[in-house]
């Protein structure tokens, strides 16, 4: 059941692709490293107000997730339609579920004076 | 080491008290005698049923056949049939329990005959079974059978996974059956709210049975959802665009997507409850920062989409039934598709309506209440579309049509009571009363159950090659409809009069007449179920007169009617080309149905796999061990499950080939049957002359 | 052909492995759907965690329990293992020799094991400091979320070991290639979940 592993007709194009894909991983890892170092540094060494820190690390994490999707999982707009739809649909549902939960349980905690707010 | 601890190591927390007779024998009070006899009788039926089945198979020497033709089969059609069999068995048990509950309440003025604990087990098993082990397997079974045929595929995308899902569901069902014999089920209802279901209040095995049965079935359903969704996206016959798919397939797609995304919250909720009970976590406990409202929230993030997982396939079935028995294309196809998509998405945004009274802010209730009411709009669109489908059609009143018409009338009523409940200020008054019980049975019986039974009638001839008896079918349908109305309309009134749900006894004489009426209705439903059974037997005995080998008894419109009844293992000798909606109607109109293909090719199919039954058995063993704290069993079975998966990873030779010559021979033989058959008009479709070949010359047949 | 269309998420084998590439469309799509279902699972556990952060009930909280250096090391290990798995995928696609592929996979496995080792060490330290799950709602939520990810990584590692076995037994046949592609997705996906964990649990907890 084996198949020939190397059947790239026009070698230059194949090589070009290979190089591009290699650099995709490399740039991914470099970007991810930066996006990791900054928030860790901010929390460990910084003295910024807590809310600011929350916002900054939240945004950086979001960007890092996109970096991983883009460079490690190769998700982009050249995706087949159903793949992209699936990811976006899942994202929407995640937002509905997590957002709803936080809203509902937060409101409940506030009204019952549970220790949800610090 | 004491003997007691050795015994505990071997059989966990099982004791003589776990047997249903034991308390009755030890302490024969009147109450214990009645409850013990009922529970003991049920246990005997379960054990006796098992013994009869096992003995029967052994006597007939059918074990090998059962194993190789059914249990290890990866054929989506056989898997579908097995799902439906599970559903019918479980339905039998749950309906008997329902009648028992209705009897208790009918005589429940200042007492009744059941103990509160027993009554609590009854509504818990009834609800759990009906949702997870009746409705889910039924609809998954029907989708399994029909959907691949409708899209012109040979099988689902992952046949072995399909078999695993089936066996996990079966394991869950067997676990619930085991609770009849060993120990007692939970009394926490079908949604098992903590803190009542925490170890502090219910230290016994009941909630554990509930947790692990749900986990098994939930896992199975998630995998099924993935399987179906991928199948519909990737395996459609060439030319079948998404908007050429039959409506049932659309419904299957929406339902599968909902299963994929709605099952995880259930998994999280039950897993966290299990962590609380087994490892002393504090998610939902009363102390140390636990918060039971988390459970409520998580459960209903799953729970609401779940009810739409149930109803959407039924909507799909009604769409097929209405258009086929009206001899017309479905009215408003695009609006129908759009409507189910809207319903599917909206259903993820309304879960709070199950706990308006929990204590969150009013703006939250307002938002979720309005979202709930919005679902009425797409549903209304569908109702009108179905009615327009019948309009000026040549409607034939067959058994499925009786269910379908009953559905339209009754479902609208049930839906309207739902819109009433979606108003938080009204809900505060009738929350957790019988009004709610009336509402959800009013949507779930005429909606889901009628749809599934209609589908069972509709596709039965395709599956087994002969039609079901029409007279008994119509009788059963009428009993279902009338019985439903008699059993549940009184509950609306009872709810408004203040009767809480799950009440074992009451002190208000005004309830009695309504309770009696409801009991009568429940009995009528029992008659309906019995008629379905008789119908099956009668039809089986008369199967030779009612054969429809050609496979198209109702002048069907989609591809599943294009092949023989029952279809060959590979469904289609060559994959059909599709260029329109209602592909088979088009083919009949253009005379391209029943033609031999230009060329036959070898067909590759998956081989049988023991993976499914093995994983199912190990899943059962893990769950049973967890329930009874038999840790050695849990460890062994878990290791076994891992080993099975690893070994399966090394399997390579997993397909078999059916040679083109064999396909050709089989197909030619069937074409011979087709040529010999006499076409029938719709007037004759329920008579023996109907061999499954539809007369295309009759007026309006091709419209 | 400079603009390759991606037929499925993840590294596309493309013309280099036409047969696997064709089957992968369905298989990988299916696996991706599973991942999305898993993502919902994680999302809900996250929402449990976020709504229980303050339910410490007198037991130690994040500031007393978490150790930023060790989390940082874990993060780097996991990121590195994502990269090495990427290299493994590339050598599967382009290289003739199994050796290089196996080398990258083994390296990934070592990094993953390192991550698990450090994480276990963290957990033990937490318990020693009074951070066992039965002490508070917050700790219960923590012990559901972070070990859940750890269990996924463990599962992935076991799968990886089995794959090495399959490569040894069958070489790189279609089935093995498909499995490697799926495991790659799984591995990268877990790294994404980890981003959320170190941000929401550790960094926000220590901020
Ligand atoms: C066929 C005739 C049926 C009858 C006579 C019946 C009767 C009952 C009764 C008496 C209860 C207890 C009500 C109470 O709490 O006071 C109940 C509860 C329930 N039923 Fe049915 N039922 C029927 C069919 C179904 C079906 C088809 C489903 C779902 C597919 C279903 C789902 C439920 C659920 C979820 C509960 C709630 C259990 C709980 O309280 O936790 N029932 N039913
Ligand atoms: Cu709802």
Image (cartoon, rainbow, N blue to C red):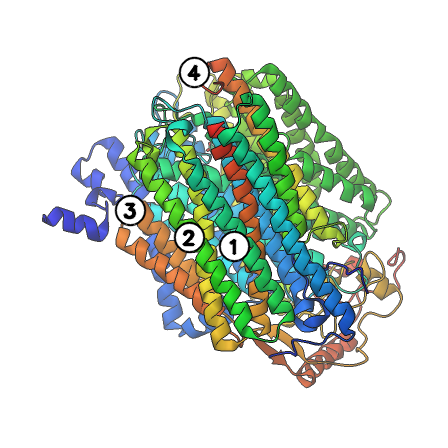
Q: Is residue A17 above or below residue B46?
A: below
Residue B599 appears anywhere in the view: yes
Check disc 2 and report its element: helix, strand or loop.
helix
Residue B230 occupies quadrant = bottom right
**Which secondary structure lies at badge 3?**
helix
Q: Which mark is residue B508?
A: 4
Chain at numbered mark 4: B
- Work out whether mark 2 precedes mark 1 in sequence or the reverse, and give the earlier one: 1
Q: Position of residue B149 (x, y in %)?
A: 69, 62
Closest to the observer: B222 or C94?
A: C94
A40 over C9 or under it: above or below: above
User: Which of the chains bears the disc numbered 2?
Assistant: C
Q: Which mark is residue B403?
A: none
- Label 3: how many residues lie within 10 Å, few (<14), some (14-19) or many (20+)? many
x, y (%) of residue B225?
Answer: 59, 51
Foreground mark, 2 or 3?
Answer: 2
The residue drawn where x is 21% and y is 32% is B29
Mark 3, residue position: B628
Q: Residues within 10 Å of mark 4 (few under 14, many from 20)?
A: few
Q: Nearer the viewer, mark 4 or mark 2?
A: 2
Q: Secondary structure at mark 4?
A: loop
Residue named by callout 2: C114
Between disc 1 and disc 3, the foreground one is: 1
Residue bearing the label numbered 1 = C81
Q: Residues within 10 Å of mark 1 (few under 14, many from 20)?
A: many
């Amino acid at each position: 059941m084996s198949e020939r592993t190397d059947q790239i007709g026009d070698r230059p194009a194949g090589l070009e692709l290979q190089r591009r894909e290699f650099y995709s991983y490399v740039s991914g890892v470099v970007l991810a490293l930066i996006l990791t170092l900054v928030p860790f540094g901010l929390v460990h060494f910084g003295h910024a107000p807590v809310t600011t820190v929350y916002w900054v690390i939240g945004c950086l994490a979001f960007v890092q997730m996109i970096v991983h999707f883009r460079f490690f999982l190769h998700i982009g707009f050249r995706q087949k339609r159903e793949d992209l739809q699936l990811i976006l649909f899942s994202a929407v549902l995640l937002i509905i579920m997590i957002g709803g939960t936080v809203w509902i349980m937060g409101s409940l905690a506030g009204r019952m004076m549970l220790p949800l707010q610090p | 080491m004491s003997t007691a601890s050795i015994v505990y190591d071997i059989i966990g927390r099982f004791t003589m008290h776990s047997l249903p007779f034991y308390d009755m024998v030890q302490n024969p009070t009147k109450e214990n005698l009645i409850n013990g006899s009922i529970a003991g009788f049920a246990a005997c039926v379960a054990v006796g049923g098992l013994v009869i089945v096992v003995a029967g198979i052994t006597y007939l020497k059918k074990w090998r056949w059962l194993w190789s033709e059914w249990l290890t089969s990866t054929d989506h059609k056989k898997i579908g049939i097995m799902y439906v069999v599970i559903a019918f068995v479980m339905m039998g048990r749950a309906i008997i329990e329902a009648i028992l509950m209705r009897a208790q309440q009918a005589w429940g003025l200042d007492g009744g005959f059941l103990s509160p604990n027993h009554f609590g087990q009854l509504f818990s098993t009834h609800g759990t079974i009906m949702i997870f082990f009746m409705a889910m397997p039924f609809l998954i079974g029907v989708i399994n059978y029909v959907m691949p045929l409708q899209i012109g595929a040979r099988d689902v995308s992952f046949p072995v996974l399909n078999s695993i899902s089936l066996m996990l569901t079966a394991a869950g069902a067997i676990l619930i059956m085991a609770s009849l014999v060993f120990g007692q089920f939970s009394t926490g209802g079908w949604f098992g709210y903590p803190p009542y279901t925490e170890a502090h209040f219910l230290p016994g095995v009941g909630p554990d049975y509930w947790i692990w049965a749900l986990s098994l079935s939930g896992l199975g359903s998630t995998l099924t959802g993935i399987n179906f969704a991928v199948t519909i996206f990737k395996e459609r016959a060439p030319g079948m665009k998404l908007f050429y798919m039959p409506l049932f397939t659309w419904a299957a797609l929406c339902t599968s997507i909902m299963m994929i995304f709605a099952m995880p919250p259930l998994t999280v909720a039950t897993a966290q409850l299990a962590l609380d009970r087994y490892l002393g976590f504090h998610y939902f406990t009363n102390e140390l920062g636990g918060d039971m409202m988390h459970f409520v929230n998580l459960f209903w993030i799953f729970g609401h989409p779940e009810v739409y997982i149930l109803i959407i396939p039924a909507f799909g079935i009604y769409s097929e039934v209405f258009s086929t028995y009206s001899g017309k294309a479905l009215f408003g196809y695009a609006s129908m598709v759009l409507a189910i998509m809207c319903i599917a998405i909206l259903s993820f945004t309304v879960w709070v309506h199950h706990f308006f009274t929990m204590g969150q802010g009013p703006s939250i209730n307002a938002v979720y209440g309005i979202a709930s009411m919005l679902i009425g709009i797409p549903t209304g669109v569908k109702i009108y579309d179905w009615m327009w489908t019948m309009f000026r059609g040549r409607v034939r009143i067959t058994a499925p049509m009786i269910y379908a018409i009953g559905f339209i009338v009754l479902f609208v009523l049930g839906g309207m009571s739902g819109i009433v409940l979606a108003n938080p200020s009204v809900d505060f008054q009738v929350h957790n009363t019988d009004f709610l019980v009336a509402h959800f049975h009013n949507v779930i019986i005429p909606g889901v159950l009628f749809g599934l039974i209609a589908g069972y009638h509709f596709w039965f001839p395709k599956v087994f090659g002969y039609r079901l008896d029409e007279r008994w079918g119509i009788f059963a349908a009428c009993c279902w409809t009338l019985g439903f109305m008699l059993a549940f309309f009184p509950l609306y009134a009872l709810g408004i009069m203040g009767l809480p749900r799950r009440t074992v006894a009451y002190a208000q004489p005004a309830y009695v007449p309504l309770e009696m009426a409801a009991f009568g209705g429940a009995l009528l439903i029992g008659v309906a179920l019995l008629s379905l059974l008789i119908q099956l037997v009668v039809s089986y005995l008369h199967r030779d007169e009612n054969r429809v080998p050609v496979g198209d008894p109702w002048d069907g419109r989609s591809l599943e009617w294009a092949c023989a009844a029952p279809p060959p293992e590979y469904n289609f000798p060559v994959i059909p080309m599709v260029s329109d909606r209602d592909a088979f109607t088009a083919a009949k109109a253009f005379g391209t149905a029943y033609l031999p293909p230009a060329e036959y090719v070898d067909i590759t199919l998956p081989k049988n796999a023991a993976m499914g039954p093995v994983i199912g058995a190990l899943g059962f063993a893990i769950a049973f061990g967890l329930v009874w704290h038999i840790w050695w069993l849990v460890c062994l079975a878990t290791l076994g499950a891992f080993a099975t998966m690893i070994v399966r990873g090394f399997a390579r030779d997993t397909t078999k080939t059916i040679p083109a010559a064999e396909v050709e021979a089989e197909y030619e033989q069937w074409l011979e049957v087709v040529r010999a058959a006499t076409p029938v008009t719709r007037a004759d479709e329920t008579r023996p002359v109907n061999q499954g070949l539809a007369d295309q010359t009759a007026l309006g047949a091709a419209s | 052909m400079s603009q390759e269309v991606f037929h499925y998420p993840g590294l596309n084998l493309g013309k280099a492995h036409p047969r696997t590439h064709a089957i992968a469309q369905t298989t990988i799509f299916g696996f991706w759907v599973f991942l999305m279902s898993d993502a919902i699972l994680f999302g809900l556990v996250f929402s449990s965690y976020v709504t229980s952060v303050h339910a410490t009930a007198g037991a130690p909280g994040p500031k007393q329990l978490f150790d930023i250096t060790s989390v940082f090391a874990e993060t780097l290990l996991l990121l590195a293992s994502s990269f090495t798995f990427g290299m493994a995928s590339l050598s599967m696609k382009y290289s003739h020799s199994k050796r290089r592929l196996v080398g990258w996979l083994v390296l990934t496995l070592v990094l993953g094991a390192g991550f698990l080792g450090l994480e276990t060490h963290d957990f033990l330290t937490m318990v020693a400091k009074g951070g066992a799950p039965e002490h508070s709602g917050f700790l219960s939520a923590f012990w559901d979320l972070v070990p859940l990810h750890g269990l996924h990584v463990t599962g992935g590692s076991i799968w990886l070991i089995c794959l090495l076995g399959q490569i040894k037994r069958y070489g790189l046949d279609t089935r093995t290639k498909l499995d490697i592609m799926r495991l790659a997705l799984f591995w990268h996906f877990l790294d994404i979940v980890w981003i959320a964990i170190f941000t929401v649990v550790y960094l926000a907890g220590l901020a």
